[in-house]
Image (cartoon, helix red, strand yellow):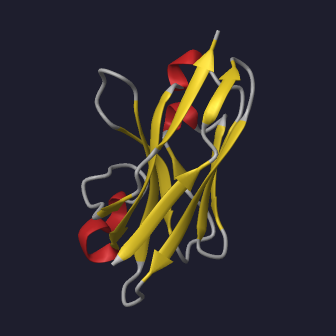
Amino acid sequence: QVRLAESGGGSVQAGGSLRLSCTIRFDRGDRYCLMWVRQAPGKDREAVGGMYDDDAHARVRGSLADRFFISYDQNALYLQMDSLKPEDSGTYYCAAGPMSRVGSTCGSADDGMLYWGKGTLVTISS
């Protein structure tokens, strides 16, 4: 069982920054992939990026890699978002899945995610 809780969403103007946090409670026993996933209104869910909890670096979606940065420290996953654009608006979810389900797709696809937070809303105005 993994419990996730996001925070840090809000409304900012284009060009601004936000830092999202996800506090994580593990019932240890597996290695977990931790991801950020977003969904804009009327659009499909989209993987932002992620990492295994014992990795040093995260994988971030190519189109976002120059503006979005993911890190993990002491049972918290972070998403630093810079130079925000209106198209970055949406609900951002933190998710976790065990390595046995996720394998090498950690950060690039959310198919193996078993546990989800409730999401935090990000609104970017032009």
How many numbered discs, if any?
0
* Residue occupying the far right of the picture: 16
Quarter of the rendering containing residue 21:
bottom right
Judging depth in this view, the residue of 101 and 42 nearest the camera is 42
Image x and y of residue 86, in percent: 57, 17
Residue at the image point whose x is 35% and y is 64% from the top: 104
Residue located 66% across and 35% down the image: 66
Residue 30 placed where, x, y %?
Answer: 37, 85
- Quarter of the image holding residue 17? top right
The residue shown at (41%, 56%) is: 117
Q: Position of residue 6 (x, y in %)?
A: 53, 54
Q: Against 114, is 123 above or below?
A: above
Could you say which is closer to the camera, residue 65 or residue 111?
A: 111
Q: Quadrant of the N terminus?
A: bottom left
Residue 83, quarter of the rendered image: top right
Q: Is residue 102 left or right of residue 120?
A: left
Work out whether 83 lies above or below 51.
above
- Residue for point 66% across, 34% down: 67
Q: Give the vertical position of 53 relative to 95 (above or below).
A: below
Extreme-top residue of the structure: 126
Q: Is residue 28 above or below residue 76?
A: below
Residue 18 location in percent, x, y?
69, 38
Picture quarter with the C terminus: top right
**In the figure, is residue 120 to the left or right of 3?**
right
In-image side of 70 versus 32 (left or right): right
